Amino acid sequence: MVAPQLPLPAFFSLARSLGISSVEIRNDLPGLPILDGTPPAAVRAFAEEAGVAILSINALQKFNHWSPERAAEAEALADYAAACGAGALVLVAANDGTGLDRSERVANATQALAGLSPILSARRLTGLIECLGFAACSLSLKSEAVAAIAAANGQGAFRLVHDTFHHRLAGEAQLFPQETGLIHISGVDDPAVAFTDMRDSHRVLVGPRDRLDNLGQIAALRAAGCRALLSLEPFAEELRTLADPAKAIGQSIDFVSDALEERAA
C-alpha cells in the first residue's frame, strides 16, 4: 500500500533503493499481481532479480468466517504464497458487523485457525492474524486472537500482526510482544478527526505530526523483546500521486529510525 501505483518490479526496485530487503505484497490491488493473473513464478523471479524477500501476502479476508468456500480460498492463496516465495499469509478478521457477539468471537476464530493450520503447515507458511480496531470488526482485540490460537493448539503456526493504527483504535493495553510476528505502521496527522471516526483514508506515512503514538508503540514492543519487522501500511489517496514516492517513504523511514535511536540512547 505504500506505492500501489508502481508495477511490482518497480516496487521491488524501490525497496532495494531504500535499503530494504524484505517486502509485503497484497492480493487486492486492481491491475497488479495477484489480481491481474500474474503467475507466482513471475512474482518470485521479480523479487529474486531485485534481491528482496517476500515476507508475506496481505491478506486472506474474513478468515474467521470459516466455510468450505473460505477453505478453498485459503488453499488457493496459500498455494500462491508458497509458489512466489512468501513466508507468511496475513489473516484479516471480518469487518462487516457480523460475528460480533462475545460468545462468537473467539469460537469463530478458533474454528478457522483449526481449519487453516494444516493448509498453512503443508506449505510451510506462518499465519499472521490481524485484528482490526473498528467497531464493526469481529476480532478487534489481540487478546481474543491469542485465546483462539491457544484453543486451536496453533502456537507454532500463528503469530499476531501488531497494527499501530488498529491497536490505538481498539484501545487495548496489552502488546503481546512475544506473540507478534509483524508490525504494520501508519500515522494519522489530521488534527480534526476523532479517534472513533478514523478510517483507512486517514492513514499516512509516519511523521512528526502522528497522533497514534507509533514511536511509543514500537519502542515498547522493542523494549519487551519483539524483533518483528515493520511494514509501512498507509492508505491515504494522496500518497498514490506522489511525484517522488521514494523521497517520502525514505523520509518516513528515517524519521522513525532516528526517533527510535534517540529514545534508546
Image: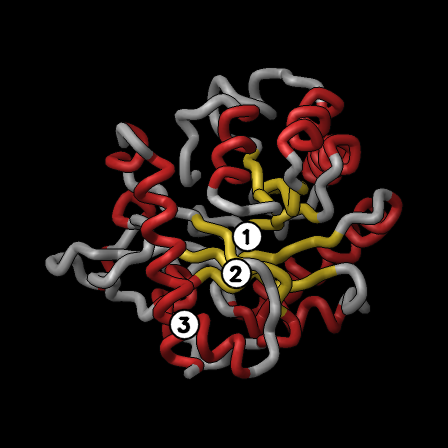
In the picture, the quarter occupied by the N terminus is top left
Q: Say which of marks 3 and 1 sits in front.
A: 3
> Nearer the N terminus, badge 2 or badge 3?
2
Q: Amino acid at mark 3?
A: Leu
The percent position of residue 92, horizontal first and vertical second, equals 56, 50
Identify the residue under disc 2: 183
Instruction: Identify the element where label 1 is drawn.
Output: loop
* Residue type highlighted by circle 1: Ala
What separation in Å lies between label 2 and label 1 (alpha carbons)? 16 Å
Q: Secondary structure at mark 2?
A: strand
Give percent across and percent down for residue 238.
Answer: 24, 36
Residue pointed to by mark 1: 93
Residue 161 occupies quadrant = bottom right
Q: Position of residue 207 (x, y in %)?
A: 27, 58
Quadrant for the C terminus in the image:
bottom left
Tell me the crowding category of disc 1: few under 14, some 14 to 19, or many 20 or more residues within 10 angstroms, Cα based.
Answer: many
Disc 2 residue type? Ile
